[in-house]
Amino acid sequence: MQEKIIILDFGSQTTQLIGRRVREMDTYCEIVPYNKFPKEDKSIKGVILSGSPFSVYDENTFKADLAEIRGNYPVLGICYGAQFMAYSNGGNVEPAGTREYGRAHLTSFDKENPLLKGVRENSQVWMSHGDTITAIPAGFTKIASTDKVEVAAYQVENEQTWGVQFHPEVFHNEDGTQILKNFVVGICGCKQDWSPASFIETIVKELKEQLGDDKVVLALSGGVDSSVAAVLLNRAVGKNLTCVFVDHGLLRKNEFENVMRDYEHLGLNVIGVNAKDKFYRELAGVSDPEMKRKIIGKGFIDVFDQEAHKLKDVKWLAQGTIYPDVIESLSITGTVIKSHHNVGGLPEKMNLKLCEPLRLLFKDEVRRVGRELGMMEHLISRQPFPGPGLAVRILGDITPEKVRILQDADDIFIQGLRDWGLYDKVWQAGVILLPVQSVGVMGDERTYENAVALRAVTSTDAMTADWAHLPYKFLGKMSNDIINKVKGVNRVTYDISSKPPATIEWE
Ligand code: XMP
């Protein structure tokens, strides 16, 4: 059985980060709502209580019953998690002054305590909560103070229970990883044996049991998640998996053909559907971005549904849903607040059971699994690309000619980034076709043609992004190449907006 750490989520923005840090120690963990502790699970080695946007004394604060947890498993409370345990055992928690926020340094601490082994004198920690523990309950021992906070960490006497008021999971904590490792490995005794290879072995076995001889259908997008899901399922059920890859006519230049070839090399059973005309027809004259998205989403479902109906006896719909989608789709009271089907609405409509083999993996783990499965690097390290594709990069209405212009310009830019060794340095890049014509001269002739914007951003999660500071020389070369080679473009601009307040896409 795969041993694991359970992270009880009290709603903090850094809960996912705790999960990532634990996984980075090659230890499996699951994030569950604070009131959904899986007490039947026999493979739990320890429990972490996350932070929270609430204060312990807020009326609507999240209160967990820890009676069956404390004493039975090692427990580490982080920030609110630490305050909650202190407060509910008779300690004092009070609003902190601004002085206690942000950067602080561990000035005195118990170097022998198993949680703090290897932590350096004056190590920097990061406090983010608006509250602070001003008195710990009887039976709790202070094990660390900072220059600003008296009780920065505590342990419950004769119990494997700790609390830290800072956030060891965030980057600014110099010895945060050491502290988490002390807990996960030193205290909980996790063996650090979670690896892509062990994941593949376990999941393939589980998929074989779950799916038996049933037929499965999966929609491929050309992106990393759906591709890795397909290769995993192919290992488990072979030809019982049929993949459908729809060309909506808004992919990058030659993307459909290239990706189809890759999929065939991977041994996947893929039906490629050329539905360009349908999409161009339905999109004709539509300028509103949300309308474009709706038309493409619905069109996609129609095409996929039609193909799936041609297959006999399909029982399962597989999707490349990954862990951040799953976490985001659960409110911490356990109700679904946002459904994250990659192919929205399909399962309901098709009456199929849902199979999501990657639902417990983070993005970087999906990539590691893909590499372990022997997939080509260019499929694995591909930049994100929006589902509606070039439709949201052609501002205004869409015509096949505009798609052609944009594909040609985009191809020069993306190939240029690769040739100059810049592709892997940016999170995402592409070209936007603007609804603007401007005057130019070519040879002796006056031209009146389209302007395009190049967009390249750096980011770690697409939530925030900065414009990539690409070399002027490179930008100059791209501008020349695009204007000289792409018929219909006579002006190139570079987008230097960051997100927020701009977004990555223009629509
Ligand atoms: P924005 O433009 O909101 O984009 O900063 C953040 C990330 O999401 C991608 N994106 C989409 N992906 N369907 C998708 O599958 C969409 O409608 C869509 N809109 C934006 C965008 O490319 C970036 O990676």
Image: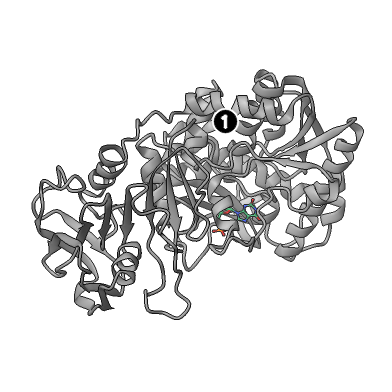
| Residue 471 vs residue 466, the one in the foreground | 466
Residue at the spot 11% in from the left edge and 66% down from the top edge:
147
Q: Tell me which amino acid carries mark 1.
A: Leu
Left or right: 121 as drawn, with respect to 357: left
Front-most of residues 318 and 265: 318
Which image quarter holds the C terminus? Answer: bottom right
Q: How is the image coloured?
A: one colour
Q: In this view of the protein, which residue sits in the foreground, 479 or 470? A: 470
Q: Does any atom of ligand 1 lie closer than 8 Å to the CB of label 1?
A: no
Q: Quadrant of residue 307?
A: top right
Q: Is residue 304 visible?
A: yes
Residue 221, image x, y percentages: 68, 39
In depth, the one of 128 and 65 nearer the eye is 65
Q: Measured from the top left, where is residue 503 in percent x and y?
A: 53, 62
Relative to residue 344, is residue 68 drawn left or right?
Answer: left
Q: Residue at x 59, y 42 (%)?
A: 359
SS state under label 1: helix
Residue 83: quadrant of the picture: bottom left
Task: Answer yes or no: is residue 279 visible.
Answer: no
Answer above or below: position of 165 versus 168: below
| Residue at numbered disc 1 | 379
On the rendered structure, is 474 left or right of 155? right
How busy is the neighbourhood of tag 1: few (under 14 within 10 Å), some, or many (20 plus)?
Answer: many
Name the residue at 88% across, 31% down.
Answer: 313
Quadrant of residue 411 within the rendered picture: top right
- Compared with residue 426, is residue 155 higher up or lower down, i.e. above or below? below
Is 93 left or right of 107, judged from the image as shown? right
Percent of width and height locating residue 30:
48, 46
Tally of numbered discs: 1
